[in-house]
Image (cartoon, coloured by chain):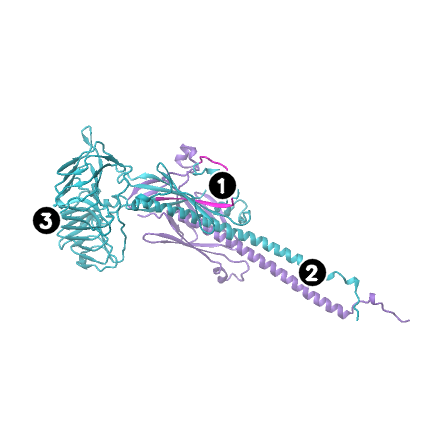
Amino acid sequence: MKLRKQPFQEGNVLICALCTILVISLIGANVLQNSTTRFNVASSQVRSWKEALFAAETGGDIGYAEVRKTVLDPSHAFEGWTTSGLQRTSPVITFGNNNLSTSTVIDVFYYDPATGNPWYRSRTRGTAPVKGLLRTGMDDRMDANTKGDSLLRKIDFFTDHFIATYGPNGDGVDKAIVPVANPQVTRRIEQISAPITPFEAAIRANGIFYGLGSAAYVDSYRSKNGAYDSSVKDNPSHPNFGDSRSGTVEINTAVATIQGSIYGNVYTNGGTVTKRTTNITGVIDNNVPFSLVPLEMPSAATWNYVASPSAVNGNTTITPAAPGSATSPNYYLITSFANNGNLTVTPAMNAGSPQETYVTLHVTDNIGNSTSSSPSIEVPLHVHLKIYFDGNLQTKAQNIINTSGYAGNLQFYAISPTDPSVQQTIDLNSGGGSTTGFSAVFYAPTANFTINGAPDITGAIVCKNFYANGNIHWHYDRELDNEGVAVDYRIVSYVEDTR
Amino acid sequence: MKRTTSLKTRGFTLTEVMIALGIGGVALGATLTSSISLQKSFRAIDSYFATHMQQIRIVDYLSRDVKRGLIVTTSADLQTVTITIPNYIYQKTDPEAIANPALVGTPRQPTITNTPSGPQVNYGTTTSTVVYSINGLSILRTENGAVTTIASSTDQLVPLTTDVELANTEYTKTSITFQPIFSSGGSVASRSGTTVYSTAYLRNKRRG
């Protein structure tokens, strides 16, 4: 049978189908446009904005690592960076799947006048590309006059808005229109790295601890509040009582044989404090690990080298011509320090008046090298002496003479042997029950420290193994908390430049 | 006389028309209903996403300020957050900038001050204060008196911030919720389902 066409019915279905497709397409296009806009914001622009901060903080971490190297590995600090005076600039580093980039400028902006330790400022920029269409797509629908997204997330589509408005360093200098290759977000942070000084406790032992003797004690005071007074620690009504019980002992192993009294806290690393624990006035915490890294000789680049003397044999006096400063001390390289060497460092004079004089020695040998050693070191008033030594130190407590009584004025630093099988030692054997002590601090992270007799000591020590056998009275001066050379750095300030 | 019927002019029977109209009506009704539902759904999703973007914006603003904050305090109802931040950029009203207007808009040099708890980094002798608060349907950020509306939604955005201060660290925990427009009866579940959480640590916590 043959079907007959109905001409007046032609086209209806086609028109309906086209209209339906049109309506659906319009809806689809609308949805797509909204989705793309939202996607741009949520997935691309917000992400880029966050990633730019990640990049900046990565650059900050890289810079911080270099700052730490200035004390942990001085010979390799800032390798590959550009140096201009006290300012160092990193190369631009690109990383990650999204091609994030970062660069850092670090400068020394402050020297601690007392210790000479530098503080570093790190200014880092991190950049993340913005993928997607060249449109903001930002959601500003909150108020006719405010644009929250634009205020918060600044995207450079064609030019770098920061350089154009504030200059490359943000100080209004050298403003320029600088095109960007692709849309990008850049964020800038500034961090301050502060030195960590080593004498935050009376005694820190990285290895085992034994001491200090059954009638010994460790207590504390604060020298700026007056001279040490042994009665304060047992007198709660005394105004300085609060400073008298910070004679803290920190031990980084489980081996902690405590004898005598500790007017302070005792920390160990998984240990069980044995013996007279009732004589510990503070907290006993057996879960306080820490780490000490070997000490390297710091850079002497800013120090004022003085050629003579180069050895201490018999009576040797050093009197610098100029007082120097904590940042730029008078620096002497001593290749020999004999058993009978008696070193006295006297202050530089100006018109007959002694000046606050800063002296640093680097002894590349032992200071005393036998059990009968009795070399002496004398530091009169107005002298601030640091002694770095590569070998061992052996003498009697009474041979360490610091007239000022402030332990920060006589600092010993034991440079760690490059051969780890070599055991460095510090042996202060007073003998004969002598009670004559000293005021000094020791930073010797890889040296075993031994002290005998009954000396009265003001100061602090950081060592490997600590052994004391005698009725030692050890007074930690809380002013030492900020004393000494930097042994590490920590970030103490973080600011984002939100412009 | 016999009436002849031309095939070309023949109409539909009443039954056919009624059936066709019925089917057409149902189809049209279904289409209209679907269209309206789609529109409503689209509007709801669009609004949900837009409000979600505002949640993210609030979180980003707050995190940025908390990270660089020196001190953070929150109100008892957890809806007002006050942050003290370093005065990093010279402002017009700063004494140094009054003396030397060229300094306005430039970054400050950090200085070190010795305090009982150790050396402290400062940018100038004053600090800036940022306050986050709710005003009606808007979330406001006020920095040194200058108000910015950072979010505004009829979906009733509610940020809640808790400040957690420990011995050696401090951080804020923020949760932001809103009431989606397609929820029925303002149920608690529909609000809690929109929660965005954020934690930000103070990098400059002041000690002592």
In the rendered image, residue A189, in percent from the top left (x then y), is placed at 41, 44
Q: For residue B3, what is the image quadrant?
A: bottom right
- A488 displayed left or right of A59: left
Tell me which numbered mark, 1 or 3, is placed earlier along the sequence.
1
Q: Is residue A358 above or below residue A201?
A: above
- Judging by the rendered image, the residue that carries numbered circle 2 is A17
- Judging by the rendered image, the residue that carries numbered circle 1 is A160
Q: Is residue A478 magenta?
A: no
* Chain letter for the residue marked with disc 2 in the picture: A
Q: Residue at x 15, y 44 (%)?
A: A368
Q: Give the tally of numbered discs.
A: 3
Tell me which numbered mark, 2 or 1, is placed earlier along the sequence.
2
Q: Nearer the observer, disc 3 or disc 2?
A: 3
In the rendered image, residue B171, in percent from the top left (x then y), is placed at 38, 52
Which element carries disc 2, helix, strand or loop? Answer: helix
Disc 3 marks a residue whose amino acid type is: Gly
